[in-house]
Image (tube, rainbow, N blue to C red):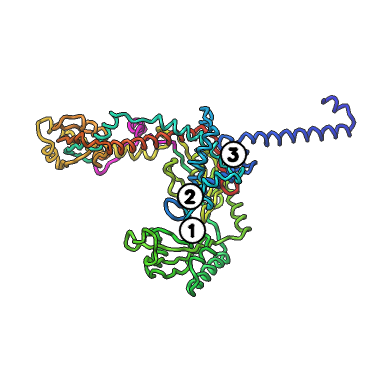
Amino acid sequence: MLSYLRSGNKRKKLIWWILIVITAFTFVIGFSFFGGMGDPGTKARLTGDVGSVNGSGITQAQYLTAVDEQRMAYRQRFGSDPADQDLKAVERDAWRALLNERMFAEEAKRAGLKATDGEVLVGMRTNPPTVLLAQPAFQTDGKFDANKYLGALANPQMGNTWEPFEDMLRQSLPVKKLQERLLASIKLTQPELQQAFRDRYERTTATLLLVPAADTGRSSGSEEVLAKTYETYKSRMASPSRTMLEVLAVPVVFADDETKAAMEMGRSLYERALRGEDFGQLARDYSEGPNATRGGLIDRWLAPNELGTMIGAAVQAKKPGELIEPLREGGRVMLFKIMDPAQDTSANRMPPTPGAVKLSQIIIKVRPSAESFRKQHKDVQAIASRAKSVGLSKAATEKGLSTFKTGYYDQSNGPQQLLAVPEVSEWGLSASKGDVSPVYEGGDAFVVAQVAMQHAAGVPTREEVGEQLRLIADADARVEMAKPRADSVVAAIKAGRRLEEAASAVRLVAMPVMTTRQQPDPRLAGSPELIGMMLGAPAGQVVGPVRSSAGWLFVRKDAVFAPADSLLNDQLKGQLTNEILSQRQRRFFDGYIDKLRSKSEIADLRGAGGM
């Protein structure tokens, strides 16, 4: 080829070099593009999906259907539509439900579980998809009417109307079969039930003595001391898989004319309501908040501490039936009416606490111009892009901004700082250390996060608990300083003195306690070793000293009061069985889902910008 190029004339050489450049360019671009096709996030973006699980896309329609189902469940439970943080929690739960459904579906497929036509037919009759239960055509007085539904199901004129819903059941039934199979594997034996009965109702009385740690003092902080402390306490630091995020929250900036327009709208609606227009109708026509279709009614009692400073003060100054003037909070202008209890026809018409009120609301959102919003979003997205190469903290500092860290969290305990944007913490559970999130719109701020730390279930490393380890070592040193005092108690007991006398000799007082295995006395709960020693000792014997974070513990078992076997009747057996199995099932499924998530490739593209 090269010799051929060298032998040709200038025109041939030029043509061949152009072909070579085009071929190389096409190869590089094609490699980059199709190589990226292996990334689940890239695949999802190309199809317009909101995310994927192991390459299986989650469409916008599927996500919105899941949100509607969670919203309906919220409405059935609380009697109102979710608002603000509650709505975010509904969206989080919908996303988790979709992820779990996809992961369980894959496991069901591996197990060879399928849905037969007969099972789909029975399911359509007895347990239809949730989305059908909310259809107005199948409801009477706002509740699902089985007769209307079954009548429509038997109507031959409906034709192929039911096929999409049959497909839903065909996909969900194998998952239900898998879940039923897993649940059936969790059992409770009769000896376990009897032990649970004793753990709950057998009471032990005892006398406790605490020799407290010294008030002051610190460890040397040497490497030897810290290493020993880590080895001693590391098993107690074990926890589920956990994530820590570094977060940048950039407030949305509203121009004066934008806030003025929202306030003027609020003031206009306030004056119209004062002139006699129906507040509920105004809410239905103009409110952008929850329950607008129900006249803005927040159908539950709000305690004074739930109202905030401004609204709480305004409510105290007004009477039932009166209006509260428009208030601006961040990107919202709020207008309230205090509902009159005399006109409340709901079942919970009496306030549960003094000062509690029911309100109807109209929410007007402050809207930045499209150009301003795009520019602010673009600026934050530039920071996020920069963070991929230098880290979020440095990228934010370069723009004069600061970040914060969430602390470790898991799926069951999200970070409090991100309650307004739970999708950010949800993203972090599936991301890897160092990953940078899309730009999320969190109420009145743009939010970007980077995974600062991520740890699998188990014991943390020394580096993760560095500062905490020093605090534990210092506390341990103060406990060690109290050992001579505890040794004096040991010597007194060996000399035949009672525990109360030994305590008095070191200017302490022994305390009576009563405890059960299931709910230990709080003074004993922090020392499971002491509880085990006490329960295994004969009455009258003193056990200890046992080292604890508070000092040195001694306890004398005084008496045991065993429950009568006749108390374990059928009703109590059923109650205990349900409680124990529910706890075991919850722990099992939490661990099972964590395991599935840890080995799944999950792409969450719900964030604005879809980076």
Q: Is residue 263 left or right of residue 5?
A: left
In the figure, residue 369 lies in which quadrant? bottom right
Q: Name the residue tied to disc 3.
A: 57
N-term mark: 2 or 1: 2
State the SS at label 2.
loop
Label 2 Cα crowd, 10 Å radius (few <14 / some 14-19 / many 20+): some
State the SS at label 3.
strand
> Relative to 446, is 127 above or below?
above
Label 1 Cα crowd, 10 Å radius (few <14 / some 14-19 / many 20+): many
> In this view of the protein, which residue sits in the foreground, 382 or 273?
273
Q: Which amino acid type is marked by label 1? A: Asn
Q: Name the residue tied to disc 2.
A: 145
State the SS at label 1.
loop
Q: Quadrant of the N terminus?
A: top right
Query: Residue visible at 47% across and 56% down?
Result: 141
Query: Residue visible at 50% across and 71% down?
Result: 277
Q: Which mark is residue 291?
A: 1
Label 3 Cα crowd, 10 Å radius (few <14 / some 14-19 / many 20+): many
